[in-house]
Amino acid sequence: MPIVDMQKVFLFSHQQEKDTVINILRDLGAVELVDLKEGSAWEEIKSLLVPEQSADAVTRLESQLGEVRYCLDFLQRHFPVQKSFAQQFTGAKINLTSAEYADYISRGEEIKAIYKACRAADEKLTNLRNEETRYHNLLQGLAPWAGFSLPLGQIENTGRLRMHLFTVPTDDLLSLQKSLTETAPDHYLEVVSTDKELAYFFLIFLADEAKQVQEMLKEAGAAEVSFPGISDTASQAISTLNKKLVNIQHERTELVKKVEELLVHRPHLMAYFDYLEGERAKKEVVGNFARTETSFLLEGWIPAPLVSNLEKALAEKSETAILVVRDPEPEEKVPVLLQNSGTADAFEVVTRLYSTPSQREIDPTPLMAPFFFVFFGICLSDAGYGVVLSLLALFLSRKIKLGGMGKQLIKLLFLGGISSFVFGVLMGSWFGDLLKLRALWFNPLDDPMRMLIVCFILGFIQIFFGMGVRAYQNIKAGRTLDALFDQGFWYIFLIGLVSLASPQFGAAGKWLAIGGALGLVLTQGRSQKGVFKKFFGGLLSLYNVTGYLSDVLSYSRLLALGLATGVIAAAINTMGGLLARGIVGVIVMVIVLIGGHFFNLIISALGSYVHTSRLQYIEFFGKFFEGGGRAFRPFCKTTKFVEIEEREA
Amino acid sequence: MTGIVLALLGAALAVGLAGIGSAMGVGLVGQSAAGVVTEDPDKFGQTLLLQALPGTQGIYGLLTGFIIMQRVGVIGADLLNLTMQQGFSVFMASLPVAIVGFISAIYQGKAAAAGVGLIAKRPEELGKAIIYAVMVETYAVLALLASIMLLFGIAL
């Protein structure tokens, strides 16, 4: 039974046992809670209830969570946890025994101190960075004045003299000097430095002539520069600043070392974060309950086989809980849990990536699994690649712990490797033509037409099978005539058309095709009103034959992808062969072969996976599968950072 | 000019045009992927998967080019002396993958880039994003098939 039967549960218990019940539900992880307010009974029981006062607790949890998240982010910023490529898909978690976990949770008080330490270090680091930026800017401003010997503090206006530092566009410097000499001959101008854009100069002029001089400076585009707070010469100031910068560097290194010391707390923070999240989830769940002063009621879905587990757990740990279980009512939207046993379980991931089946459908997974297995093998079709892929999948499943879809995907790749090995042996492909073993069946490279026919036949089988499933669904739903009209006549018509092509059955095929077509013309317009509409609707339906044609042709991709794998592998081997001259050549050859074949394996396996999936989704599922179900999401323990190993409990 | 020049032109077009298309497609996806990864670096792996999809056309082109080189003897055996008609036939055989590969890779890139946007909000829907992009690739696969069948069918 691939789609698990669901039961509706109602649980009624004393308010004092609320936490106990929530913990039981969470540890069991088998009940999806339903918000009672959405239910039909809400109106009737509404008046009996009192609101929950857990808002305070939630706020406190939220703020604690915020602190822990801040610490983790801070540590992550300075000492990021590197994730491997695979972990980017799966997430990186640390493993803790349940004793360690419990220890971390009991020391929740320490989190406050860690938070303070993080906060302080973060603030200091920010201050240092601001200071550093300021010094850097100042250094940039001072650099052009490095050659100026007068201490900057001594640039001061006196009673008769005005003195300032200026910049002016380099191109305008000469004309400025000239006009100054003309209008105010009693001035002193020292050009300190020039660069591409600006000239930097020091100017002394008479206070009496200030007005004219300032006018001229303005015209030339000169701007005054000042360095408040610096009394040394520019070069002295620069060296002081550089020393300060070095100090900042030191301070920062010290601080980062201190932050590094905080790193030991990271597992603690992670564990506590997950703990707090769990607590918050519990509080949120309570929002779905209906409660009075002394009791509460909850509603949920549970897979039928797990009802006894829940009953047992409640009997053990709770004194007041009353459980009522009933079958779902016809109008209720039941969440769907897929459960395939054995090998078919791996193919669930393919179905789930398309859509969860609705509760009234059959799970297409076991029907699709054999096709997926075979098609993947034909697409990759290399014995060597198959072995490597399976070993890789085996290695990954040992190396990283995965749950749910990830685990299924790895298993799927493992099975795909086996299938690829089988077809590789049949078609005589071992890393392309690296090992020249004779094909047990035939090599598609020698006879692509034959392989194309094989692909079409496989496609034909799958499409017919899909139609068969639809017919079965129709018959089961009591629509036997629909099955005869919509699938039966198409069977007759299509088989007739195919037989037309063969010399032996040509005559029979002709009559089958005509008979089938006649049946279709007479029945396919049956939903229309009026004789003419019925007739034309039926006639038009024959046009759908192009749909079946293109569906079958679509399976030619099996051949194309198989050829692509083989020919690219052969190309890599040829390239490698060209290099094999001398020892260095042989080494390079080996590198080219390994790298090339690995690349080809990854690309071809990806192509095989996506194209095989497509054949299932469009060509096969399109015939009978509707989907649109809602996946079952039980209330359970979820962790973001830590994985708790239960065995040492 | 003998047939061999035309045959090699065919190989060059198959590799070149399909390669250009893939480069553009992969580039397009890379741009949107980089945007998403700015927000969430953990999506690198998923977006990389999508970015790889429009790359296959370039490989199909290379594959076709390689078959041509092998058939006319540029690699391996001695160079064949092709007639104009043979050379032209090989040239024609390269066109499906060259043209369809070029254009389909760009459009697949667009579909995959939109898929990147999809997984930015709903990472669990990666499968659907991939399928949308693969719908486009179908036509490149069919073109590759046509090119290969033509090449194996031409008597040299």
Image (tube, coloured by chain):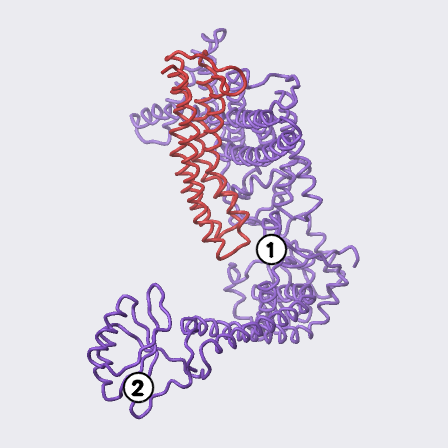
Nearer to us: label 2 or label 1: 2
Kindly identify the amino acid type of the residue bearing the numbered disc 2: Arg
Which residue occupies the extreme bottom position in the image? A159
Q: Is residue A324 above or below residue B79?
A: below
How many marks on residues? 2
Q: Secondary structure at mark 2?
A: strand
Q: Position of residue B103 (x, y in %)?
A: 38, 34
Name the residue at 65% across, 39% down. Answer: A411
Q: Closest to the observer: B130 or B92?
A: B92
Q: Which chain does the numbered disc 2 sit on?
A: A
Q: Quadrant of the C terminus of chain A?
A: bottom right
Q: Is residue A431 left or right of residue A454?
A: right
Kindly identify the amino acid type of the residue bearing the numbered disc 1: Glu
Quick one: which chain is purple?
Answer: A
Quick one: which chain is red?
Answer: B
| Residue behind mark 2 | A162
| Residue behind mark 1 | A32
Q: Which chain does the numbered disc 1 sit on?
A: A
Q: Is residue A494 above or below residue A133?
A: above
Picture quarter containing residue A174?
bottom left
Name the residue at 41% across, 74% down. Answer: A145
Q: Secondary structure at mark 1?
A: strand
Q: Position of residue B72 (x, y in %)?
A: 47, 17
Q: Closest to the observer: A261 or A64?
A: A261
